[in-house]
Image (tube, grey):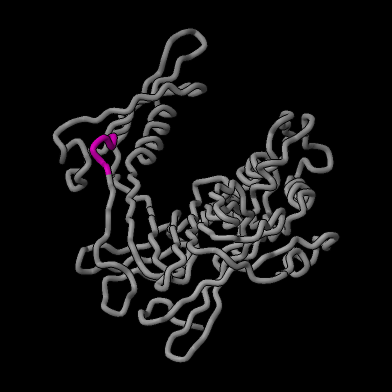
Amino acid sequence: MIDMNKGGRTTSWRFVRVRRVIGWKSEAYEDNAYEEVGTVSGITSCSIEEAQLTSLKVSGSIEYVDMPDLGDDLLRVYADMELDGEVESKCYGTFFVYSKSEEVCEGSHVGTADLYSVLVLLEQRLLESNYAVGAAYTANYLPVVSEMVYEVGLPLMLTPGGWEVAATKTWEVGTSFLEMANDIMELYGYGSLNVDVWGNVIAKPYQDPETAVATTVFSDTEEDVSDETVKREWDVHDTPNVVVVRSKLKDDSEVIGSAENADPNNPYSTAARGMRIVRFEEVEGLETKAQCQEKAEELLIEGMQSIERLTIGHAGKRFNAGDTVAVDYRRSGLSGKYSAYKRSVKATPDTESETTMRRTVKLYGNVAKS
């Protein structure tokens, strides 16, 4: 396997037509779901966008000259790489090709088209009547997700979970299969449905990036293919250091409790900043000052967090958006583990890429109740 953290490799891009197999068996997963039926000529450029905060997760675009119409077939993108005599083909995604726009002149078709992940089939499929889940599924909604994915003809790789949800739920007519499935994923503490490069739908429990193993490392060493310059975004100016919680009682009286970060060693505390940045919350169902204080402390700890984002340009590396990655930019004082939630890849000889990653930075110190 080629070391993708090293420079010097050569890369050529290959595009393959993929057909969904009619009558494949769902229990066989990806083995029988797709077949490659030949190369696709005419594509002059390709870019892929992996974005974990979007419902389809992966999209892209191509430019072409006289590319054949794929219809309902898909396009699979490969990078054929060579480094120090070692050869490897790496798949970057399997897509539907939609939204063509082209110019036709003297029999030649020159245009662009958009690439969509296979999750688009779940987004396009809408409920034709209200759908209630209960009875046999009351303790386990996951079979419902499997049914929906298989119904649109996609393979599913689902990691079983041990949770049970003892409640019925109804989705209204017109709700997309994808929205409904993601609602169920959230009930179980799973991440939203994802997709791998082969066109398999992925359902697995959410994992905190801080506890996950890093897939790759970005560094500012001479041996790494990453740029030395990093774009960093981090905004803490309105981070609260005081939270006040009020709850109204049935007799129209009220109870109030608060929590304060007064730790002089914490740079975001009332003592260090010399000002009180107050967050106020109205919370129902609390009956005592102690309960309000406890809720205020919970909200203060929750509020004293900031999202730090890094954007790094690099040649291709071996990871996917959604993975946990490590950063080791010692000369810039940046280090730690981040969730790589967005990545762009261009089909160029050096696999020109840009990744945006983020982590939650905890800003709180000692909290005092009052």
Q: For the view shown, which residue lies furthest in the front direction?
A: 106
Q: Is residue 33 above or below residue 276?
A: below
Which residue appears at 48% of the width and 62% of the height? 45
Return the residue found at the far right. 23
| Residue 159 seen by the camera | no
Q: How many marks?
A: 0
x, y percent for residue 168: 74, 34
Magenta highlight: main SS: loop
Question: Is 218 colored magenta in this rendering?
Answer: no
Q: Which residue is more in the foreground, 61 or 167?
A: 61
Residue reaching furthest top?
251
The x, y position of residue 94, in whole percent, is: 62, 61
Apparent side of residue 342 relative to residue 173 in the rendered image (left or right):
left
Residue 239: say if magenta. yes
Q: Is residue 195 left or right of residue 83?
A: right
Residue 254, horizontal then vertical, whole percent: 41, 14
Residue at x 79%, y 49% (from the top left corner): 151
In percent of the image, x 27 and y 55: which residue is there?
A: 231
- Using residue 269 as the reference point, say whether residue 16 is left or right of it: right
Magenta stretch in the rendered image: 235-240
337 versus 277 height, above or below: below
- Residue 87 x/y as whole percent: 52, 85
| Placement of 266 over or under 345, stated as above or below | above
Q: Nearer the viewer, residue 42 or 341?
A: 42
Residue at point 60%, 67% (across, down): 41
Front residue of this view, candidates 139 and 144: 144
Q: Is residue 225 visible?
A: yes
Q: Quadrant of residue 10?
A: bottom left
